[in-house]
Amino acid sequence: MAMLPTTFHNPILKGFYPDPSVCRVGDRYYMVTSSFYYFPGLPVFESRDLVHWRQIGNAIERPEQLDFRNCDISEGLWAATIRYHDGKFYIVNTLDVNGRTNRYNFIVTAEDPAGPWSEATIIQGADGIDPSLYFDEEGRVWFCSNHIPDQLAFPSHKQIILRELDPDTFQFTGPEYVVFDAVTDHSLFMEAPHIYRIDGWYYLITAEGGTQTNHCVNMYRSRHLTGSYEPCPHNPIVTNRGVKMVNGTGIAVTGHGDLVQTQLGEWYMVVLGIRPYEKRIEDYERFQPRMWIRTPDRNKSAQFNLGRETFLVPIAWEEDGWPVIDNENGLVNASERRPQLPWHREAYQSRVDNFEMEKLDLCWLMQRPPEKPFHSLTARPGFLRLRMLPGLAEEKATSAAILRRQQHNDFQVAAAMEFTPRAEGEEAGILVTQNERFSFLLVKERKAGRNCIACYQIINGQRHLLAAENAPEGRMYLFVEGQTGQYSFYYGAQEREMKALMLNADGSYLSTLVADGYVGVLLGMYASNGRVKEADRQADSHADFDWFRYEAIEE
């Protein structure tokens, strides 16, 4: 009999899956991550061993659940918390829209974590971001979040507040408690609180330092739920910030954690982190406007295109009742000790989509909830049809794009496309995007009276032509290959034909650090008539995709 592995490899969720939250129900584990403006939102995962995860649904899967059509790519659905209580799953989350001028905290519930999830209940008067729920021993439910005090002791000063919710209406009842104030330990950008009851103590964990170079997890405890909470004497309890960004672990900016105890008594924490590669950029100020991530200080050489990912680390409790990372170096590592749980990996699902199902696979996303459907799996059975929208890849207007996460630095995607442009300016093909200001396009288009295959780079919202050739008639095969910070683009008239159009384009422009924001690179199928004169646009213009393939390239 083969020996079971004693270690596992991080990250446990590859690609843009940040801000993880986890809970256990019996011998099953459930996790949710943030998704920002992408739809469907708040992906929900299930696991039996904390290592192998299968997406089972999305908590926000119907456009009518929440309206976040008017939001920037890094607005929308922020960090969520998933909890289980008395036969029901709960997700509490922050919705940020309208240029950060409107922010709502809401709750959705489900009896089955795969869905359907309920309509969203807005918690009136709920402030802060990255909320959590705590169910106490008496069955009461508490809302926990960060809060900006009226009087700031320092620019990033935050407090953690706790307030009881009515279990039926999810509205506040009773007073608000400030359970921890960052003036106590000068925590910066304190957020993402979670409360646990362990061995007679209430433990509070928070994310601190901002989701960049100084990111970490802090812990506090109290004998009383409403505080006051004392800091752990060796905070932070989880971080990789004490080493260089590009380091031997291959992992950086770890933080934003959630604890879980296995049915066998072991403790683990899920955290976000990145896998950076080295590419020095001196002048980040030329990439404007910077709305989300501060201009880098010590992090000028560590780029990351994949976004923030989900990692797992073992935790042990010391004799003094405080936790530590349970490994040799006290860091989050690429290889960690696996939980002593039955090893359970679901049957492998191919990364080739032939579009033969009634619904899109759970891996596919759209940019914001659509006002009306722009894709069809039935108009031409066995194909994904994209109806052209006027939104261009470099515009904030929603594009006709069906995208999936880039999950590996070295990868190849390929698509079989049938599309003949009928008007000057129609285009369809593959979009590789960090946001509308930083992307690549590999598209078939009609230009100057001829059909072309063109590769464009979008930098600071401006489209630049990298290369173009005459396009073959009929079906085309499109290929994009990634190699740690570079992208190459190919096309062909046959599936095994790969004609180079643009090789080794600088992909550091798609680094989250350059492009700004909280997401990662997504790629997939795209169609637009936005460059067609409005009078010449045809309502039935579309592109058909027979299949789309994503492959990791192994050395």
Image: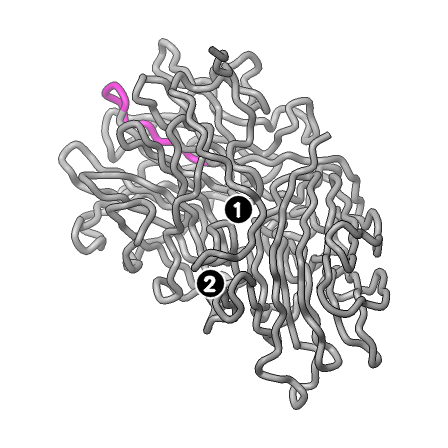
Q: Nearer the viewer, residue 98 or 111?
A: 111
Q: Quadrant of residue 367?
A: bottom right
In percent of width and height, residue 29 lies at 35, 33
Q: Secondary structure at mark 1?
A: loop
Give the x, y percent position of residue 431.
Answer: 67, 59
Q: Residue at x 43, y 59 (%)?
A: 358
Q: Residue at x 77, y 70 (%)?
A: 473
Stretch in magenta:
198-207
Vertical placement of residue 92 versus 258, above or below: below
Which residue does the image show at 50% across and 67% down from the upper left? 376
**Mark 1 vs 2, N-terminal side:** 2
Residue at 53% x, 46% y is 155
Above or below residue 184? Residue 210 is below
Spatial CA span between label 1 and label 2:
23 Å
**Which numbered mark, 1 or 2, is in the foreground of this view?**
2
Q: Which residue is mark 2?
A: 97
Residue pointed to by mark 1: 155
Position above or below: 524 against 34: below
Question: Residue 129 vs residue 279: left or right?
Answer: left
Residue 263 drawn at (x, y percent): 30, 21
Q: Given the image, on which type of amino acid does mark 2 rest?
A: Val
List x then y, in percent, for residue 554.
69, 32
**Depicted 411 relative to depicted 291: above or below:** above
Question: Circles 1 and 2: CB distance less than 8 Å?
Answer: no
Amino acid carrying label 1: it is: Pro
Residue 211 in sight in this render: yes
Badge 1: how crowded within 10 Å, few (<14), some, or many (20+)?
A: few
Residue 494: which quarter of the image? Answer: bottom right
